[in-house]
Amino acid sequence: MDRFIIDGGRRLRGSVRVSGSKNAALPILIATLLTDEPCRVDNVPTRLRDIKTTVRLLESLGKKVAVKGSSVRVASGGSLKTQAPYDLVKQMRASVLAAGPLLARFGLVRVPIPGGCAIGLRPIDIHLKAFAALGAREVADGGDIILSAPSLLKAGRVRLDFPSVGATENAMMAAAATPGTSVIENAAREPEIADLGRFLERLGARVSGLGSSRVRVRGASALKGCRHIVIPDRIEAGTFLLAGAATGGEIDLKGAHADDLSAVILKLRAAGAEIKPYTGGIRLVMRRRPKAVSVTTLPYPGFPTDLQAPWMSLMCLARGASRVRETVFENRFLHAAELARMGAQIRARGNEARVAGVERLSGAWVMASDIRAGAALVVAALAAGGRTVVQRVYHIDRGYERLEAKLRRLGARVTRTNA
Ligand code: UD1
Protein backbone atom coordinates (compact mmCIF):
# COMPACT_ATOMS: atom_id res chain seq x y z
CA MET A 1 0.00 0.00 0.00
CA ASP A 2 1.33 3.42 -0.97
CA ARG A 3 2.49 5.98 1.57
CA PHE A 4 3.43 9.63 1.35
CA ILE A 5 6.63 10.73 3.00
CA ILE A 6 6.42 14.44 3.65
CA ASP A 7 9.24 16.60 5.00
CA GLY A 8 7.28 19.59 6.21
CA GLY A 9 7.93 23.13 7.32
CA ARG A 10 8.41 24.64 3.85
CA ARG A 11 6.29 27.52 2.53
CA LEU A 12 4.35 26.49 -0.57
CA ARG A 13 5.12 28.87 -3.43
CA GLY A 14 4.26 28.90 -7.10
CA SER A 15 1.34 28.04 -9.33
CA VAL A 16 -0.61 24.88 -9.97
CA ARG A 17 -3.58 23.98 -12.18
CA VAL A 18 -6.79 22.67 -10.67
CA SER A 19 -8.18 19.45 -12.18
CA GLY A 20 -11.74 18.90 -13.33
CA SER A 21 -14.27 18.27 -10.57
CA LYS A 22 -14.54 14.67 -9.44
CA ASN A 23 -17.99 15.19 -7.97
CA ALA A 24 -19.27 16.79 -11.19
CA ALA A 25 -17.60 14.27 -13.50
CA LEU A 26 -19.07 11.25 -11.65
CA PRO A 27 -22.78 12.01 -12.20
CA ILE A 28 -22.11 13.42 -15.69
CA LEU A 29 -20.37 10.24 -16.82
CA ILE A 30 -23.18 8.19 -15.29
CA ALA A 31 -25.73 10.41 -17.07
CA THR A 32 -24.38 9.13 -20.41
CA LEU A 33 -26.55 6.08 -19.61
CA LEU A 34 -29.48 8.33 -20.59
CA THR A 35 -28.63 8.17 -24.29
CA ASP A 36 -27.48 5.63 -26.88
CA GLU A 37 -25.67 8.33 -28.83
CA PRO A 38 -21.97 9.04 -28.28
CA CYS A 39 -20.92 11.59 -25.66
CA ARG A 40 -17.58 13.22 -25.08
CA VAL A 41 -16.78 14.58 -21.62
CA ASP A 42 -13.66 16.73 -21.24
CA ASN A 43 -11.67 17.98 -18.24
CA VAL A 44 -12.32 14.73 -16.38
CA PRO A 45 -9.80 13.85 -13.63
CA THR A 46 -9.26 10.45 -15.22
CA ARG A 47 -6.38 9.41 -12.97
CA LEU A 48 -8.65 9.32 -9.92
CA ARG A 49 -9.64 5.96 -8.59
CA ASP A 50 -13.33 6.99 -8.39
CA ILE A 51 -13.33 7.95 -12.06
CA LYS A 52 -11.73 4.62 -12.98
CA THR A 53 -14.44 2.89 -10.96
CA THR A 54 -17.09 4.91 -12.82
CA VAL A 55 -15.61 3.85 -16.17
CA ARG A 56 -15.75 0.22 -15.04
CA LEU A 57 -19.34 0.72 -13.90
CA LEU A 58 -20.35 2.10 -17.31
CA GLU A 59 -18.59 -0.76 -19.06
CA SER A 60 -20.21 -3.35 -16.82
CA LEU A 61 -23.60 -1.84 -17.70
CA GLY A 62 -22.87 -2.19 -21.42
CA LYS A 63 -21.25 1.10 -22.54
CA LYS A 64 -18.04 1.39 -24.56
CA VAL A 65 -15.69 3.84 -22.92
CA ALA A 66 -12.45 5.32 -24.29
CA VAL A 67 -10.23 7.43 -22.02
CA LYS A 68 -7.55 9.66 -23.50
CA GLY A 69 -5.85 12.22 -21.28
CA SER A 70 -8.66 14.06 -19.52
CA SER A 71 -11.19 13.23 -22.22
CA VAL A 72 -13.72 10.42 -21.90
CA ARG A 73 -15.78 9.18 -24.83
CA VAL A 74 -18.78 7.04 -24.06
CA ALA A 75 -20.62 5.16 -26.80
CA SER A 76 -23.27 2.51 -27.00
CA GLY A 77 -21.97 -1.04 -26.75
CA GLY A 78 -25.28 -2.76 -27.45
CA SER A 79 -28.16 -3.09 -25.02
CA LEU A 80 -27.70 -1.82 -21.47
CA LYS A 81 -27.95 -3.98 -18.37
CA THR A 82 -30.15 -2.84 -15.52
CA GLN A 83 -28.16 -4.30 -12.65
CA ALA A 84 -25.25 -2.49 -10.97
CA PRO A 85 -22.57 -4.91 -9.66
CA TYR A 86 -22.07 -5.00 -5.88
CA ASP A 87 -18.26 -4.98 -6.02
CA LEU A 88 -18.36 -1.56 -7.72
CA VAL A 89 -21.11 -0.09 -5.53
CA LYS A 90 -19.28 -1.07 -2.35
CA GLN A 91 -16.11 0.60 -3.64
CA MET A 92 -17.91 3.78 -4.59
CA ARG A 93 -21.28 4.76 -3.21
CA ALA A 94 -21.90 7.16 -6.09
CA SER A 95 -22.54 4.04 -8.25
CA VAL A 96 -26.10 4.32 -6.89
CA LEU A 97 -26.49 7.20 -9.34
CA ALA A 98 -26.87 4.64 -12.13
CA ALA A 99 -30.34 3.88 -10.71
CA GLY A 100 -31.99 7.12 -11.91
CA PRO A 101 -31.08 6.91 -15.61
CA LEU A 102 -31.70 3.14 -15.90
CA LEU A 103 -35.01 3.20 -14.02
CA ALA A 104 -36.28 6.08 -16.15
CA ARG A 105 -35.26 4.45 -19.44
CA PHE A 106 -36.20 0.83 -18.80
CA GLY A 107 -38.68 0.93 -15.93
CA LEU A 108 -36.51 -1.47 -13.97
CA VAL A 109 -33.22 -1.42 -12.10
CA ARG A 110 -31.53 -3.52 -9.45
CA VAL A 111 -28.97 -1.79 -7.20
CA PRO A 112 -27.12 -3.14 -4.19
CA ILE A 113 -27.73 -1.15 -0.99
CA PRO A 114 -24.36 0.56 -0.53
CA GLY A 115 -23.88 0.03 3.22
CA GLY A 116 -22.04 2.43 5.50
CA CYS A 117 -18.60 3.94 5.20
CA ALA A 118 -16.01 5.51 7.50
CA ILE A 119 -17.78 8.88 7.68
CA GLY A 120 -21.24 7.59 8.47
CA LEU A 121 -24.23 5.44 7.72
CA ARG A 122 -25.06 7.15 4.43
CA PRO A 123 -28.44 5.60 3.62
CA ILE A 124 -30.22 6.07 0.26
CA ASP A 125 -33.75 6.60 1.59
CA ILE A 126 -33.99 10.10 0.07
CA HIS A 127 -33.08 8.72 -3.37
CA LEU A 128 -35.76 6.03 -3.01
CA LYS A 129 -38.42 8.52 -1.93
CA ALA A 130 -37.60 10.65 -4.96
CA PHE A 131 -38.10 7.66 -7.28
CA ALA A 132 -41.35 6.80 -5.49
CA ALA A 133 -42.61 10.34 -6.11
CA LEU A 134 -42.07 9.68 -9.82
CA GLY A 135 -44.06 6.45 -9.63
CA ALA A 136 -41.45 3.75 -8.88
CA ARG A 137 -42.11 0.79 -6.62
CA GLU A 138 -39.35 -0.78 -4.57
CA VAL A 139 -38.69 -4.26 -3.24
CA ALA A 140 -35.69 -5.33 -1.14
CA ASP A 141 -34.09 -8.61 -2.23
CA GLY A 142 -30.86 -10.17 -0.98
CA GLY A 143 -29.04 -6.93 -0.18
CA ASP A 144 -30.34 -5.27 -3.34
CA ILE A 145 -33.18 -2.90 -4.02
CA ILE A 146 -35.26 -3.60 -7.09
CA LEU A 147 -36.99 -0.51 -8.43
CA SER A 148 -39.70 -0.88 -11.00
CA ALA A 149 -42.16 1.21 -12.97
CA PRO A 150 -43.76 -1.17 -15.52
CA SER A 151 -45.25 1.66 -17.57
CA LEU A 152 -42.21 3.89 -16.94
CA LEU A 153 -41.90 6.85 -14.55
CA LYS A 154 -44.34 9.76 -14.58
CA ALA A 155 -43.17 13.36 -14.36
CA GLY A 156 -44.13 14.85 -11.01
CA ARG A 157 -43.19 16.77 -7.89
CA VAL A 158 -40.32 15.48 -5.77
CA ARG A 159 -39.73 17.01 -2.36
CA LEU A 160 -36.46 15.98 -0.71
CA ASP A 161 -36.39 15.73 3.11
CA PHE A 162 -32.81 17.00 3.03
CA PRO A 163 -30.92 18.62 0.12
CA SER A 164 -28.91 15.47 -0.58
CA VAL A 165 -26.47 15.94 -3.44
CA GLY A 166 -26.79 12.39 -4.73
CA ALA A 167 -30.59 12.25 -4.41
CA THR A 168 -30.94 15.56 -6.29
CA GLU A 169 -28.72 14.19 -9.07
CA ASN A 170 -30.57 10.89 -9.24
CA ALA A 171 -33.94 12.67 -9.39
CA MET A 172 -32.70 15.08 -12.10
CA MET A 173 -31.39 12.24 -14.25
CA ALA A 174 -34.60 10.22 -13.83
CA ALA A 175 -36.65 13.30 -14.72
CA ALA A 176 -34.51 14.02 -17.80
CA ALA A 177 -35.56 10.73 -19.42
CA THR A 178 -39.21 11.07 -18.37
CA PRO A 179 -41.48 13.10 -20.70
CA GLY A 180 -43.22 16.04 -18.99
CA THR A 181 -42.03 18.48 -16.36
CA SER A 182 -40.78 17.33 -12.96
CA VAL A 183 -40.04 19.70 -10.11
CA ILE A 184 -37.45 18.90 -7.43
CA GLU A 185 -37.99 20.87 -4.25
CA ASN A 186 -35.44 21.31 -1.48
CA ALA A 187 -32.86 20.38 -4.10
CA ALA A 188 -29.16 20.58 -3.31
CA ARG A 189 -27.54 23.69 -4.80
CA GLU A 190 -23.94 22.57 -5.23
CA PRO A 191 -22.08 23.79 -8.34
CA GLU A 192 -21.64 20.14 -9.38
CA ILE A 193 -25.43 19.85 -9.63
CA ALA A 194 -25.58 22.89 -11.88
CA ASP A 195 -22.90 21.26 -14.07
CA LEU A 196 -24.95 18.06 -14.31
CA GLY A 197 -27.97 20.23 -15.21
CA ARG A 198 -26.03 21.82 -18.07
CA PHE A 199 -25.03 18.37 -19.30
CA LEU A 200 -28.68 17.20 -19.22
CA GLU A 201 -29.61 20.27 -21.27
CA ARG A 202 -27.02 19.36 -23.87
CA LEU A 203 -28.60 15.89 -24.03
CA GLY A 204 -31.89 17.58 -24.88
CA ALA A 205 -33.71 17.96 -21.55
CA ARG A 206 -34.84 21.43 -20.43
CA VAL A 207 -33.55 22.37 -16.98
CA SER A 208 -34.26 25.55 -15.03
CA GLY A 209 -33.64 26.77 -11.50
CA LEU A 210 -30.08 25.44 -11.36
CA GLY A 211 -28.29 26.73 -8.28
CA SER A 212 -31.63 27.24 -6.49
CA SER A 213 -33.46 24.81 -4.25
CA ARG A 214 -36.23 24.31 -6.84
CA VAL A 215 -35.06 22.64 -10.01
CA ARG A 216 -37.44 21.98 -12.93
CA VAL A 217 -36.60 19.36 -15.49
CA ARG A 218 -38.57 18.83 -18.69
CA GLY A 219 -37.63 15.39 -19.86
CA ALA A 220 -37.81 13.59 -23.17
CA SER A 221 -38.13 9.91 -24.05
CA ALA A 222 -35.10 10.05 -26.36
CA LEU A 223 -32.00 12.07 -25.54
CA LYS A 224 -29.08 12.77 -27.83
CA GLY A 225 -25.30 12.72 -27.53
CA CYS A 226 -23.20 15.79 -26.74
CA ARG A 227 -19.85 17.21 -25.72
CA HIS A 228 -19.31 18.76 -22.29
CA ILE A 229 -16.43 20.30 -20.34
CA VAL A 230 -16.49 19.59 -16.58
CA ILE A 231 -16.09 22.50 -14.11
CA PRO A 232 -12.91 22.81 -12.03
CA ASP A 233 -12.74 20.98 -8.71
CA ARG A 234 -13.60 23.44 -5.93
CA ILE A 235 -12.69 20.95 -3.22
CA GLU A 236 -9.25 20.32 -4.66
CA ALA A 237 -8.81 24.09 -5.05
CA GLY A 238 -9.94 24.66 -1.45
CA THR A 239 -7.51 22.02 -0.20
CA PHE A 240 -4.61 23.79 -1.96
CA LEU A 241 -5.73 27.14 -0.52
CA LEU A 242 -5.68 25.61 2.96
CA ALA A 243 -2.27 24.01 2.37
CA GLY A 244 -0.99 27.40 1.18
CA ALA A 245 -2.41 29.11 4.26
CA ALA A 246 -1.11 26.48 6.70
CA THR A 247 2.44 26.79 5.36
CA GLY A 248 2.46 30.61 5.22
CA GLY A 249 2.69 30.27 1.47
CA GLU A 250 2.08 32.24 -1.69
CA ILE A 251 0.23 30.26 -4.34
CA ASP A 252 -1.61 30.77 -7.57
CA LEU A 253 -4.38 28.30 -8.37
CA LYS A 254 -4.96 28.33 -12.10
CA GLY A 255 -8.43 27.44 -13.27
CA ALA A 256 -10.06 27.73 -9.81
CA HIS A 257 -13.50 29.41 -9.61
CA ALA A 258 -13.65 31.77 -6.64
CA ASP A 259 -17.47 32.01 -6.88
CA ASP A 260 -17.78 28.32 -5.98
CA LEU A 261 -15.61 28.83 -2.88
CA SER A 262 -17.20 31.96 -1.35
CA ALA A 263 -17.79 30.47 2.11
CA VAL A 264 -14.24 29.13 2.28
CA ILE A 265 -12.64 32.35 1.04
CA LEU A 266 -14.62 34.33 3.62
CA LYS A 267 -13.29 32.14 6.43
CA LEU A 268 -9.75 32.14 5.05
CA ARG A 269 -9.76 35.93 4.94
CA ALA A 270 -11.01 36.03 8.52
CA ALA A 271 -8.06 33.78 9.40
CA GLY A 272 -5.70 36.34 7.88
CA ALA A 273 -5.12 35.12 4.31
CA GLU A 274 -4.93 37.60 1.46
CA ILE A 275 -6.97 36.18 -1.39
CA LYS A 276 -7.25 37.69 -4.84
CA PRO A 277 -9.60 36.04 -7.27
CA TYR A 278 -8.87 36.92 -10.92
CA THR A 279 -10.34 35.73 -14.21
CA GLY A 280 -9.13 32.17 -14.47
CA GLY A 281 -7.77 31.61 -10.99
CA ILE A 282 -7.21 32.53 -7.34
CA ARG A 283 -4.08 33.85 -5.64
CA LEU A 284 -3.42 33.38 -1.93
CA VAL A 285 -0.75 34.93 0.26
CA MET A 286 -0.47 34.13 3.96
CA ARG A 287 1.98 36.32 5.83
CA ARG A 288 1.20 35.43 9.43
CA ARG A 289 0.12 32.70 11.76
CA PRO A 290 -3.60 32.02 11.14
CA LYS A 291 -6.21 33.50 13.46
CA ALA A 292 -8.68 31.08 15.05
CA VAL A 293 -11.97 31.03 13.09
CA SER A 294 -14.87 28.67 13.80
CA VAL A 295 -16.79 26.92 11.01
CA THR A 296 -20.01 24.94 10.70
CA THR A 297 -20.43 22.69 7.67
CA LEU A 298 -23.67 23.04 5.72
CA PRO A 299 -25.05 22.18 2.31
CA TYR A 300 -23.89 24.62 -0.40
CA PRO A 301 -23.54 27.62 -0.30
CA GLY A 302 -22.44 26.92 3.30
CA PHE A 303 -18.98 25.77 4.33
CA PRO A 304 -18.39 22.41 2.55
CA THR A 305 -18.14 19.27 4.65
CA ASP A 306 -15.44 18.08 2.24
CA LEU A 307 -13.14 20.88 3.49
CA GLN A 308 -13.92 20.46 7.17
CA ALA A 309 -10.98 18.13 7.81
CA PRO A 310 -8.32 20.23 6.05
CA TRP A 311 -9.78 23.34 7.72
CA MET A 312 -9.25 21.68 11.07
CA SER A 313 -5.59 21.15 10.17
CA LEU A 314 -5.24 24.88 9.56
CA MET A 315 -6.94 25.68 12.86
CA CYS A 316 -4.54 23.34 14.70
CA LEU A 317 -1.89 25.96 13.94
CA ALA A 318 -4.00 29.03 14.71
CA ARG A 319 -3.46 31.65 17.36
CA GLY A 320 -6.33 30.88 19.76
CA ALA A 321 -9.14 28.36 19.97
CA SER A 322 -11.91 27.60 17.48
CA ARG A 323 -14.81 25.20 17.01
CA VAL A 324 -15.56 23.00 14.05
CA ARG A 325 -19.15 21.78 13.76
CA GLU A 326 -20.06 19.05 11.32
CA THR A 327 -23.76 18.97 10.41
CA VAL A 328 -23.74 17.02 7.12
CA PHE A 329 -22.18 13.67 8.12
CA GLU A 330 -22.40 12.05 11.54
CA ASN A 331 -18.92 10.62 11.91
CA ARG A 332 -16.48 12.88 10.20
CA PHE A 333 -13.80 13.59 12.82
CA LEU A 334 -11.62 10.53 12.26
CA HIS A 335 -8.72 12.82 11.35
CA ALA A 336 -8.76 14.44 14.82
CA ALA A 337 -7.04 11.52 16.55
CA GLU A 338 -4.42 11.34 13.79
CA LEU A 339 -3.78 15.09 13.99
CA ALA A 340 -3.33 14.66 17.75
CA ARG A 341 -0.41 12.33 16.98
CA MET A 342 1.23 15.34 15.35
CA GLY A 343 0.77 17.47 18.47
CA ALA A 344 -2.64 18.99 17.73
CA GLN A 345 -4.92 19.89 20.63
CA ILE A 346 -8.41 18.78 19.64
CA ARG A 347 -11.38 17.72 21.75
CA ALA A 348 -14.04 16.13 19.59
CA ARG A 349 -17.41 15.29 21.06
CA GLY A 350 -20.49 14.42 19.00
CA ASN A 351 -20.57 16.66 15.96
CA GLU A 352 -18.39 19.38 17.44
CA ALA A 353 -14.62 19.67 17.84
CA ARG A 354 -12.78 22.32 19.85
CA VAL A 355 -9.37 23.07 18.50
CA ALA A 356 -6.78 24.91 20.57
CA GLY A 357 -4.11 26.18 18.18
CA VAL A 358 -0.49 25.26 18.81
CA GLU A 359 2.53 27.04 17.41
CA ARG A 360 4.00 23.97 15.78
CA LEU A 361 2.95 20.50 14.72
CA SER A 362 5.54 17.79 14.43
CA GLY A 363 5.88 14.95 11.94
CA ALA A 364 4.55 11.51 12.85
CA TRP A 365 3.23 8.28 11.32
CA VAL A 366 -0.45 8.81 10.58
CA MET A 367 -3.18 7.01 8.66
CA ALA A 368 -5.79 8.32 6.19
CA SER A 369 -9.31 7.01 6.86
CA ASP A 370 -11.16 8.67 3.96
CA ILE A 371 -10.40 11.07 1.11
CA ARG A 372 -10.71 14.33 2.99
CA ALA A 373 -9.24 13.07 6.27
CA GLY A 374 -6.25 12.07 4.17
CA ALA A 375 -6.08 15.55 2.66
CA ALA A 376 -6.16 17.03 6.16
CA LEU A 377 -3.16 14.94 7.19
CA VAL A 378 -1.26 16.10 4.12
CA VAL A 379 -2.04 19.76 4.90
CA ALA A 380 -0.86 19.29 8.49
CA ALA A 381 2.25 17.40 7.37
CA LEU A 382 3.25 20.15 4.93
CA ALA A 383 3.19 22.67 7.77
CA ALA A 384 4.68 20.42 10.46
CA GLY A 385 8.30 20.29 11.48
CA GLY A 386 10.06 17.04 10.55
CA ARG A 387 8.91 13.99 8.64
CA THR A 388 5.37 12.68 8.40
CA VAL A 389 4.46 9.34 6.88
CA VAL A 390 0.86 9.26 5.66
CA GLN A 391 -0.37 5.70 5.28
CA ARG A 392 -3.31 4.43 3.20
CA VAL A 393 -2.81 6.93 0.43
CA TYR A 394 -5.33 4.98 -1.67
CA HIS A 395 -8.05 6.98 0.09
CA ILE A 396 -6.43 10.22 -1.09
CA ASP A 397 -6.07 8.83 -4.61
CA ARG A 398 -9.84 8.57 -4.84
CA GLY A 399 -10.17 12.34 -4.85
CA TYR A 400 -6.88 14.12 -5.62
CA GLU A 401 -5.17 13.78 -8.98
CA ARG A 402 -1.35 13.64 -8.90
CA LEU A 403 -1.37 15.33 -5.51
CA GLU A 404 2.29 14.74 -4.79
CA ALA A 405 3.38 16.05 -8.22
CA LYS A 406 1.28 19.19 -7.80
CA LEU A 407 2.62 19.79 -4.29
CA ARG A 408 6.19 19.31 -5.50
CA ARG A 409 5.55 22.02 -8.10
CA LEU A 410 4.81 24.29 -5.16
CA GLY A 411 8.11 23.39 -3.51
CA ALA A 412 6.90 20.73 -1.09
CA ARG A 413 9.02 17.69 -0.31
CA VAL A 414 6.64 14.81 -0.89
CA THR A 415 7.44 11.34 -2.16
CA ARG A 416 5.30 8.27 -2.66
CA THR A 417 6.66 4.93 -1.58
CA ASN A 418 5.34 1.46 -1.61
CA ALA A 419 7.41 0.05 1.23
C1 UD1 B 1 -21.80 14.16 -2.13
C2 UD1 B 1 -20.32 14.24 -2.46
C3 UD1 B 1 -19.48 14.22 -1.18
C4 UD1 B 1 -19.96 15.30 -0.23
C5 UD1 B 1 -21.46 15.24 -0.01
C6 UD1 B 1 -21.99 16.41 0.80
C7 UD1 B 1 -20.23 13.15 -4.61
C8 UD1 B 1 -19.80 11.96 -5.40
N1 UD1 B 1 -19.98 13.10 -3.30
O1 UD1 B 1 -22.01 12.90 -1.49
O2 UD1 B 1 -18.12 14.43 -1.56
O3 UD1 B 1 -19.30 15.15 1.02
O4 UD1 B 1 -22.14 15.24 -1.28
O5 UD1 B 1 -21.62 17.61 0.23
O6 UD1 B 1 -20.73 14.12 -5.15
N2 UD1 B 1 -28.42 11.07 3.30
C9 UD1 B 1 -29.48 10.32 3.79
N3 UD1 B 1 -30.25 9.66 2.91
C10 UD1 B 1 -30.04 9.69 1.56
C11 UD1 B 1 -28.98 10.46 1.06
C12 UD1 B 1 -28.18 11.14 1.96
O7 UD1 B 1 -29.69 10.27 5.00
O8 UD1 B 1 -30.81 9.05 0.80
C13 UD1 B 1 -27.55 11.81 4.25
C14 UD1 B 1 -26.11 11.28 4.18
O9 UD1 B 1 -25.95 10.13 5.01
C15 UD1 B 1 -25.32 12.46 4.68
C16 UD1 B 1 -26.13 13.65 4.12
O10 UD1 B 1 -27.43 13.15 3.83
O11 UD1 B 1 -25.32 12.51 6.09
C17 UD1 B 1 -25.53 14.26 2.87
O12 UD1 B 1 -25.43 13.30 1.88
P1 UD1 B 1 -25.46 13.64 0.32
O13 UD1 B 1 -25.65 15.10 0.13
O14 UD1 B 1 -26.41 12.71 -0.34
O15 UD1 B 1 -23.98 13.26 -0.11
P2 UD1 B 1 -23.50 12.36 -1.30
O16 UD1 B 1 -24.29 12.65 -2.53
O17 UD1 B 1 -23.37 10.94 -0.84
Image (cartoon, rainbow, N blue to C red):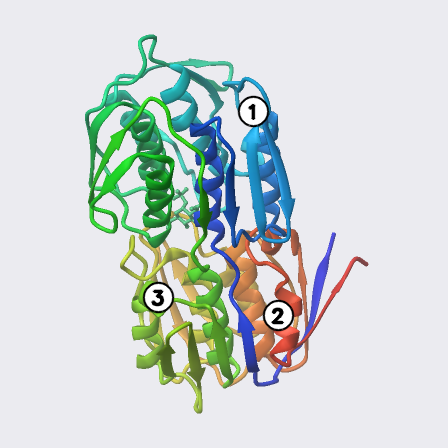
Quarter where residue 397 is shown: bottom right
Q: CA distance from mark 3 to mark 2?
A: 20 Å
> What amino acid is found at the position of numbered circle 3 in the picture?
Leu
Q: Is residue 165 above or below residue 363?
A: above
Q: CA distance from mark 1 to mark 3?
A: 35 Å
> Which mark's residue is nearer the viewer, 2 or 1?
1
- To which residue does mark 1 refer? 61
Which sits in the foreground, 326 or 165? 165
Report whether the residue tagged 2 is closer than 8 Å to ligand 1.
no
Q: Which is more N-terminal, label 3 or label 1? A: 1
Disc 2 designates what residue?
A: 406
Residue 371, placed above or below residue 260? above
Disc 3 residue: CB within 8 Å of ligand 1: no
Dot 3 crowding, Cα within 10 Å, few <14, some 14–19, many 20+: many
Could you tell me the amino acid type at mark 2? Answer: Lys
The residue indicated by pointer 3 is 261
Image quadrant for the C terminus? Answer: bottom right
The percent coordinates of residue 409 (x first, y second) are: 64, 76
**Left or right: 375 as drawn, with respect to 129:** right
- Horizontal side, residue 13 vs residue 120: left or right: right
Q: Is residue 240 above or below residue 271?
A: above
- Residue at x 20%, y 49% (from the top left corner): 212
Q: Which mark is residue 324?
A: none
